[in-house]
Structures are given as C-alpha cells and as structure tokens.
C-alpha cells in the first residue's frame, strides 16, 4: 500500500515562535516570514526562530521591510561575520561588505543568469546571502531558487552511490574576463589566481545543521570532477547540473520594493532572470561567512539510505577526504 502523502514530513505550513510567523510558500524550499520589523534589533528569541527557519526552509522571504543599508548589515551580522566579495565592486572603506547592484539601460546585469551557489570558488563558501530589493522593474527581474537537497534526493540510489565521495573542482573562472589584456592587468589576475586557487569540494556535502545531503556542484564555478577523465567529468557534471533545472525543486521569487530574501547558500542555488533590460533594478546584498564543506565518504550501497539524514555530531564525516 502506498504511504499517505505527508507534505514536509508532517510539519505545519504555518508556525509561530517568539512572534515570528513562518509560512511555507514553496514545496521544497521557500517561506515567508512575518511578525518582525527588521529596522529594530531582533531579540535573541526572534533571531533563533529565524535562524532555525532558514535551515528548515532554505529560503526566507520578508516583505515590506523598508530598511537602510546599515539595518541590512546589522541583520546579516546576527548570522555571523560578513564577507567582502573579492571581485564585485563594493562601497569602499565605509562598507566593503555591502554590494549594490544597480542595473539599467547603461549597466546591463552581468554574470548572474547562471545557476550557482555564491562564491564556491572559496575554500569556505558563504553560509548565507541576503538581498534586498530597492527598485524593481515593472515586469521581469525575478530570482529563481532551487533546493539542492531535493535535487540530491531526486537522484537514483545508483547515482547517489556513484557521486558519494567524489570531489568537484571549483574555480574563479567567471571573473577572469573582468581583467584586461595589458601586462598590469595580467599581473593583477595572477595575484587573484594565487589568492583564490581552485578548490576541491565534495560533490555531496552534508549540511552542518540539518545533516541532510546536498548536491554541491554548480555550472558557474564547478569546472571538473577530481580524478576523472575530462570527458567523463564533463558528462557527469552535465547530468548533475540538470538537477537544478527540474521545476519541481525550484521556487521563483517575484520581488516587490522592500522585499528581502535570505538563502541558505549551503543547500540552495539561484539564478537571476535577465529579462528586464533596459528597465532599472536596484538591489543591495550582504554575504555571511561559511565554514568548511564536509562531504560523505565513498559509500557502500547499503549505507547510502542510512546516512541520508544523519549528522553525526562531532564526527568527521568527511571520510578522510583531503584535497590532493
Ligand atoms: Fe549569486
């Protein structure tokens, strides 16, 4: 007999904790959060509710939060240290952690219309990113999100087994075209390449809080699979990248002015839909520092399911998986 369908494993669609109301709006990810005013400092209880909701829902949406850049940075700092993007233009000495995306007729959007988790070219990619909409186009300019936990769960047992224990090679490749051809520019690029060498990250990572498994490769930064022939790794990556394209695993966010999105960068990917040029779209972003990426060991078929939702506290689940 078929098991009765249980949405979200029996969790309620709406929950409230410390006055923070979390309403699930997507099947695999996405919840709207109400009952808070982000212009005011959050109490510890309110913040704890939001932090837990982020892990649970992977993407949080706050509507009608007319906050300043300082408020955005203060909210971000509740989650952890803010990081400075090495390649995106920022607000200089006063607020290097703040990125302003101003797109209009003269400044078309660049490089965000590809599925990715933010900054996986880093040894420790961000744990979360926050974006607030200041000005939105009359039509278009949505952001697509995808749950990479759902994407992993959707793979067959055989493929889950095959990719467990593999490492993806993540590279700063999308930023190379930002550098010119002069000797000075090539030296600058070399300097960045030394600072950000390619990183190995497990293809299947374990979320450090939920313990769920996540498919952790993306077409923006993942350029190969370690220890595989180039043509093999190309074919495997094409197959895995396609998981992000499955509509059932996605959520499409339609922005309004003063909408804030916070996504768990460890378990999701996103794609900024570039369909609004030459209209104006103005967003502000902060990014929160992440920790090491832990993966799963190469698993025997019988252990695959058993490991699925287990986060052994304090145990090195990386399985002796070291870059080499
Ligand atoms: Fe991004």
Image (cartoon, rainbow, N blue to C red):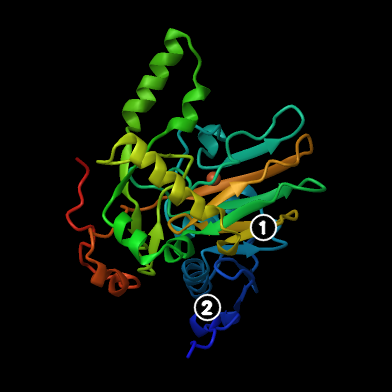
Identified at 48% across, 12% down, the residue is 181
Splitting the image into 4 quarters, where does residue 123 fall? top left
Q: Secondary structure at mark 2?
A: helix
Front one among 23 and 236: 236
Identified at 48% across, 71% down, the residue is 56
Front one among 213 and 311: 213
Indicate which disc residue 8 carries: 2
From the viewer's perspective, is residue 71 above or below residue 106?
below
- The mark nearer the N terminus, 1 or 2, is 2
Measured as percent of width and height from the top left, residue 18 is found at 55, 80
Which numbered mark, 1 or 2, is in the foreground of this view?
Answer: 2
Residue under numbered circle 1: 253
Q: Secondary structure at mark 1?
A: strand
Measured as percent of width and height from the top left, residue 113 is found at 60, 41
Is there any visible trace of residue 177 in the rendered image? yes
Front one among 144 and 262: 144
Measured as percent of width and height from the top left, residue 8 is found at 52, 78
The residue furthest bottom is 1
Splitting the image into 4 quarters, where does residue 256 fall? bottom right
From the viewer's perspective, is residue 296 above or below residue 309?
above
Labelled pair 1, 2 in contact (Cβ < 8 Å): no
Locate the C terminus by quadrant: top left
Identified at 45% across, 49% down, the residue is 239
> Is ligand 1 closer than 8 angstroms to the Cβ of mark 1?
no
Front one among 133 and 26: 26
Is there any visible trace of residue 121 in the rendered image? no
Task: Check disc 2: other Cα within 10 Å, few if <14, some if 14-19, many if 20+.
Answer: some
């Amino acid at each position: 007999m078929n098991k009765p369908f249980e949405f979200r494993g029996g969790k309620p669609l709406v929950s409230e904790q410390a006055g923070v109301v979390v309403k699930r709006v997507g099947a695999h990810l996405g919840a709207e959060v109400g009952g808070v005013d982000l212009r005011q400092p959050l109490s510890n209880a309110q913040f704890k509710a939001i932090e837990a909701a982020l892990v649970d829902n992977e993407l949080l949406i706050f509507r009608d939060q007319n906050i300043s850049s300082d408020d955005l940075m203060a909210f971000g700092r509740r989650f952890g240290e803010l990081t400075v993007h090495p390649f995106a233009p920022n607000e200089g000495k006063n607020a290097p952690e703040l990125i302003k995306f101003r797109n209009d007729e003269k400044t078309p959007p660049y490089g965000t219309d590809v599925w990715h988790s933010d900054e996986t070219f880093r040894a420790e990619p961000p744990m979360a990113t926050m974006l607030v909409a200041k000005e939105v186009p009359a039509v278009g300019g949505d952001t697509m999100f995808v749950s990479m936990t759902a994407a992993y769960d959707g793979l067959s047992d055989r493929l889950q087994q095959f990719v467990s224990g593999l490492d993806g090679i993540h590279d700063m490749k999308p930023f190379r075209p930002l550098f010119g051809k002069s000797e000075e520019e090539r030296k600058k690029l070399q300097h960045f390449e030394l600072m950000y060498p390619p990183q190995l990250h497990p293809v299947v990572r374990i979320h450090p809080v939920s313990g769920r498994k996540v498919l952790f490769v993306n077409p923006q930064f993942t350029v190969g699979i370690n220890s595989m022939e180039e043509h093999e790794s190309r074919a495997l990556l094409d197959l895995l990248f396609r998981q992000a394209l499955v509509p059932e695993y996605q959520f499409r966010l339609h922005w309004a002015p003063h909408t804030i999105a916070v996504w768990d960068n460890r378990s999701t990917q996103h794609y900024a839909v570039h369909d609004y040029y030459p209209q104006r779209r103005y967003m502000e972003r902060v990014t929160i520092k992440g920790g090491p990426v832990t993966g799963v060991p190469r698993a025997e078929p019988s252990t695959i399911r058993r490991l699925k939702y287990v986060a052994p506290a304090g145990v090195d689940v990386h399985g002796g998986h070291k870059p080499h």
